[in-house]
Image (cartoon, rainbow, N blue to C red):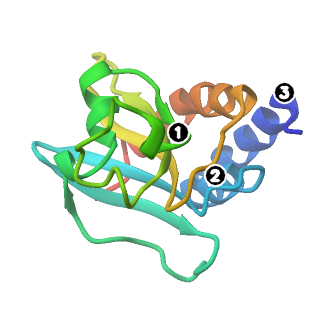
Amino acid sequence: MVKLADSLRELKTILGRQDVSAAVIFLNGPIQHRFTALYRFDEETLHNVCFFDRENPTQELTPDIPVMASYCVFVRSSRGTFTTPDSLQDDRVRGHPKWQEVQSYCGVPLLDEDGKMFKTICHFDFCPIPISDTNVELMEAVAPLIRKIAYRIPS
């Protein structure tokens, strides 16, 4: 069970070292999702800024993808957290280009100082996986901390 206060304290320490990669890896630790990533929106393209694959931890980045080909589109359109623990049972994503491939997702927006969304941090996997409310709360709590550093990360 993730303890929100303990995890947030550890993430503040990690981010105090300006280490977004370590924060992404840390966020992936208590969940079952294979992937955790930080993406930057650039018009209709998502650029991967930081990536962790627990089955292939040496892979640090992924290729650019169209926003519409990612569940990050739902984060962008709502300007809020979006989760689907089982895409095959979720009518909101039915017909999305990845609804059969990426079957679980949790994404949180990163907003700049003017409230404009510029990045998203997310967990995702090829199989259905629930995500606890505590893990969602942790991502939402750490998003403003990551934003302060991620805004300065060259992409």
Q: From what the image shows, is residue 63 above or below residue 48?
A: below
Q: Which of the 4 image quadrants contains residue 73?
A: top left
Which residue sits at x=35%, y=71%?
A: 62
Instruction: Please say if 128 is above or below 149.
Output: below
Instruction: List the residue tagged with mark 1.
Output: 146
Q: Is residue 148 visible?
A: no
**Badges 1 and 3: C-beta atoms under 8 Å apart?**
no
Q: Which of the two discs, 1 and 3, sits closer to the camera?
A: 3
Q: Can residue 152 be seen in this view?
A: yes
Q: Is mark 2 on a helix, strand or loop?
A: helix
Image coordinates of residue 146 in percent, x first then y, are 52, 39
N-terminal-most mark, 3 or 2: 3
- As measured in the structure, the alpha-carbon distance from the residue carrying label 2 to the one carrying label 1 is 8 Å
- Between the residue at mark 3 and the residue at mark 2, the CA separation in whole angstroms equals 15 Å
The residue at which mark 2 appears reads as: 23
Instruction: State the residue position of label 3.
Output: 5
